[in-house]
Image (spheres, coloured by chain):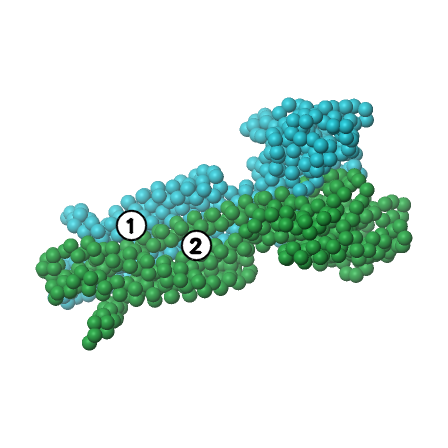
Amino acid sequence: MLFRILKNSFLKRPKAVFLVFLSITMGAAVATAFLGIAGEVSHKMALELRSYGANILLEPSALEGGGFLREEDLPKIKTVFWKYNITGFTPYLFGVAEFSANGKHERGIVSGTWFNKELVVPGEESTVQGIKVIAPWWDVQGGWPQAADDAVIGAALAKRLGLSVGGQVEATVRGTGQRFRVAGIVTTGGYEEEQVFAPLVTVQSLLRQQGKVSRVLVSALTVPMDAFGRKDPATMSKDEYEKWYCTAYVTSVAKNVEEVMAGSRAKPIWQIASAEGALLKKLNSVMLLLTILALGASATAVSTSLMASMAERSPEIALMKAVGADRFQITAIFVGETLIISLCGGVIGYLLGDQLAELISRTVFNSTIASPLWLFPTAIVSAFVVAVAGSVAPLRRALRIEPVRVLKG
Amino acid sequence: MTKRRWLVYLVARALAHRKGRTVLLLAVLAMASSLATALGIVSISMGKRVAEEVRKYGANLVIIPDSARLDVGSGGLNFGAVTEPAYLNQQEVEGALARSGLKPGRSFHLRGSLHWKDADILVEGVNFDEIRQLFPWWQIKGGWPAAGEAVVGSDMAARLGLKGGETLELAGPGQSVRVRVSGIVSSGGEEDGLFFLSLPELQKVLGLEGKLTTVRLLVTAEGESLKKRAAALQPLLPKAKVSEVRQIARTSEGLLAKVKLLMVLVTAVVLISAGSSVTGTMSTTVLERGKEIGLMKAMGGGRWEVLLIFSAEAIMLGLFGGGAGYLLGSAVAQFITRAVFATSADFIPWFACVSLGVSLFLALLGSVGPLISVFRLDPVRSLRGE
């Protein structure tokens, strides 16, 4: 009997059912899309902000220049506790050199570095590290170095030496010479414009500093500093220290990296780290508030449309009462109806919302997004709960009325 | 009774008679239009607020003397200057900035070296109140300097064994100056290896009154691209080179664009879904009035007249819903910007039009759409209640 009533109630009034179905689907879609991206947005924004450049500087712990770090320690950076938070790093080896090209001579800095080096660490996935990863703001005219004697030259230096892409430049350090082919010219508006960047190996042999690097720039995903993060680790109790170490503050990631690089000192680059933290905090709270707003709005929309559709059905309820149905039977019919609609609406809304989250993530961040699985039951259950919540008030009112009065009209 | 008065009477009675329904419809319309208003206002002020936040990444234009070169280094590290120093004229720079019409945040820097005990130390003259605005990431242990005080970079402090509160006698080429160290700065950048004095003091000690080595500017990158700003400033400063700090500039523009795009998409998704729900609710309430429409038709009401009555109802609802939605939405937007950015949102009167537009559109769509299908009904059948 119940099933027959339910079946006919769907078939005989398709328009009304469709409208309720539409609003439940839309509500579930918005909820899914928002919950799906809200969790990911802060991660995506943090990744986006990493293109501002490195936020940790590793330097030799000896205060006066002259100290070096060991190149062989570098792969260890990808094995530390916070390895998944480290999005990239690049070593540098600096030296003063005499450059000559086209009969002009200039004194300048030659920097050995990685451009996009594939780094294989045993037991870890291989990654690409280097300038291309951690400094995407570099504007390189020409190409990146491919061969060991290719170099990227700073725009200001290139102008003074009269060099263009494809030209040759000779670098001399204490009698040792090395010819470089200019693969690209870099404009950054910063110090880089006065330097020549060449593969690390070549510069190490030119400077006779095999296996050594002078600085490492590390780009790491971190959480914003809070009052606890600003505390001096030296004054912390053991538990506090553990908590600090296991939170991805820029200071604790720096400490973590420092531990694996022999003779190094890691400093957060506060210009990047503090501004990034502040910005992320704000974006996160905006997303949180918007999610609450959107969820509240879709819940209201679903409830009200149920309310509207229930209210018009008081004659039906009165008739049911007149033919002897009790409260439970009537409630069962309406809750069953709502259950079926919200089940369908929830499933379709989940699929739609998943696509929406995907679409937003692809348009804004150029990356895919995986909606967490727990969202699926959540979408359906919450669709049902919200729909029932909307129909409770009109149903109760309808159950209270005298059947005779409604039937009379 | 004229036709118009009759229409007004009919609509008012219809709305008043079905009070519960009217309140419900007003509530959903107000909700949808307040969402549009709130999201719109938040999106617009988000752009501005994020631009302000991004400024905390520091200056985006640098002015240096044409003959000088930038110091060498990478990212946060400095390798020292290579050529003989050249200077900018402070008055010329100030004049050029005034003429350019830009109102950037700025800081003036003079780099030089002073003698202390038996070592030369690298000193930078700055105006500390400019620094506090343009370099908000400086972490100062101790206090910001008052007159006759200085701050020292953390690396230099460790090297020279300096502590806060110490007094130093620094010797320049002509004269010397006594300063008290008020604090120790760490930034992770080149500041860690420098000694900071106030600009006029350093200019006096070095005998370089009115001279500067670097000017850093923070220009809002909204609208016009930074490159154009730099190009516009360059001709006003013939003896200097204006360059764009790409690390900050390019990423800021990219990030802003992303945040805006995200907000637009989010707004669109929420509006479409809330809109379709609201339209659905409106339609439900119109569909259940088949009997009424049948009666109107039976009494000789033409399609247009019925349409007119229902549209007039929808417009009334839309206007009130939109008005309430604007007020509610502005309040929500205000709350969000207060809570997140600690500033009040802009008051944007033209959003009242957006709010009214959204509400009217949804109301008309929800009531006129289903009417067309109701018209097809035979009045006799709908009166009989079939």
Of residues A344 and A22, which is closer to you in this image? A22
Q: Which numbered dot is residue B14?
A: none
Residue under circle 1?
A22
Identify whether B4 is placed above or below B271: below
Of residues B58 and A101, which is closer to you in this image? A101
Residue A240, percent from left and from top: 63, 48
Is residue A303 at least partly visible in the picture? no
Q: Nearer the viewer, mark 1 or mark 2?
A: 1
Q: Let me know if marks 1 and 2 both belong to one chain.
A: yes
Q: CA distance from mark 1 to mark 2?
A: 21 Å
What letter labels the chain drawn in green? Answer: B
Q: Residue at x 17, y 47 (%)?
A: A11
Three-letter amino acid code of the residue under disc 1? Leu
Residue under circle 2?
A292
Local crowd at mark 2 within 10 Å, few (<14), some, or many (≥20)?
A: some
Q: Residue at x 41, y 63 (%)?
A: B352
Three-letter amino acid code of the residue under disc 2? Ile
- Dividing the picture into quadrants, the one containing residue B373 is bottom left
* Image quadrant occupied by the C terminus of chain A: bottom left
- Dividing the picture into quadrants, the one containing residue A264 is top right
In the rendered image of this protein, which colour is used for chain A?
cyan
Q: Residue at x 68, y 32 (%)?
A: A153
Identify whether A181 is placed above or below A382: above
Identify whether B335 is placed above or below B50: below
Residue A221, percent from left and from top: 58, 41
Of residues A19 and B244, which is closer to you in this image? B244
Q: Is residue A94 left or right of residue B228?
A: right
Residue A136, percent from left and from top: 59, 38
Q: Residue at x 64, y 52 (%)?
A: B218
